[in-house]
Image (spheres, helix red, strand yellow):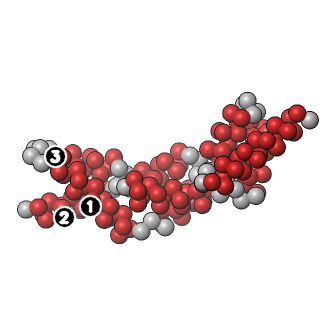
Amino acid sequence: MAEDKDMARVTDRMRRLCSRREYCRSDIMSKVVVALDGDREQAAKIVETLVNEKYIDDLRYASAFARDKSSIAGWGETKIRYMLSAKGISREAVTQALEEIDASRARTRLEKLLENKLKTLKDDPQCRLKMLRFALGRGYGYDEAAEALDSLMNERT
């Protein structure tokens, strides 16, 4: 009886959390396991309930994550793909979420990031190398970063 109350209490708490913002299945699973003192079997039941009730949707989460990280944080496709995969999101959902990113806005964001980085590396002899490394660390592809960097350098000369 007390176990049923715990399950209901934890389920309600997770519903409240999921109604405020998007969570993926793995994030909620870890929260539920902690709340139930490590009972993974009961936690899996709660997570399935939340998925069936549409509180959790990994595709919806992946889309929101990709949009936010691309437009706000300035991450590239590679880093977003890696982070979503690390959270256990399926490859199909990750691909679908990445297709929703506006490529021209992502390109503009990369150019702006590189412009700001260039200001900090004014007379550095390894400026190009450091800027490429910076763009790669943000998750942009080499070709994409090199092209944006070349156009930025051509503008400055």
Report the mark closest to the observer, 2 or 1: 1
Q: In the rendered image, is residue 143 in sight?
A: no
Comparing 82 with 105, the one in front is 105
- Between disc 1 and disc 3, whose residue precedes? 1
Query: In the rendered image, which quarter contains the C terminus?
Result: bottom left
Left or right, residue 122 beside residue 82: left
Residue 77, disc: none
Q: Secondary structure at mark 2?
A: helix
Q: Residue 112 sits in which quadrant?
A: bottom left
- Between disc 3 and disc 2, whose residue precedes? 3
Q: Is residue 10 above or below residue 146?
A: above
* Mark 1–mark 3 distance (CA, rounded to whole Å): 15 Å
Q: Is residue 56 above or below residue 99?
A: above
Q: Are marks 1 and 3 in contact (CB under 8 Å)?
A: no
Residue 26: percent from left, percent from top:
63, 45
Report the mark closest to the observer, 3 or 2: 3
Crowd tier of the residue under label 1, counting other residues whose Cα lies within 10 Å: few below 14, some 14–19, many 20 or above: some
Crowd tier of the residue under label 2, counting other residues whose Cα lies within 10 Å: few below 14, some 14–19, many 20 or above: few
Q: Are marks 2 and 1 in contact (CB under 8 Å)?
A: yes
Which residue is disc 1 drawn over? 111
Which residue is disc 2 drawn over? 151
Q: Are marks 3 and 2 in contact (CB under 8 Å)?
A: no
- Between disc 2 and disc 1, whose residue precedes? 1
Residue drawn at x 28%, y 55% is 113
Q: Secondary structure at mark 3?
A: loop
Amino acid type at mark 2: Ser
Which residue is disc 3 drawn over? 121
Residue 60: percent from left, percent from top:
60, 60
Comparing 32 with 128, the one in front is 32
Residue drawn at x 70%, y 50% is 16
* Mark 3–mark 2 distance (CA, rounded to whole Å): 17 Å
Q: In the rendered image, is residue 7 in sight?
A: yes
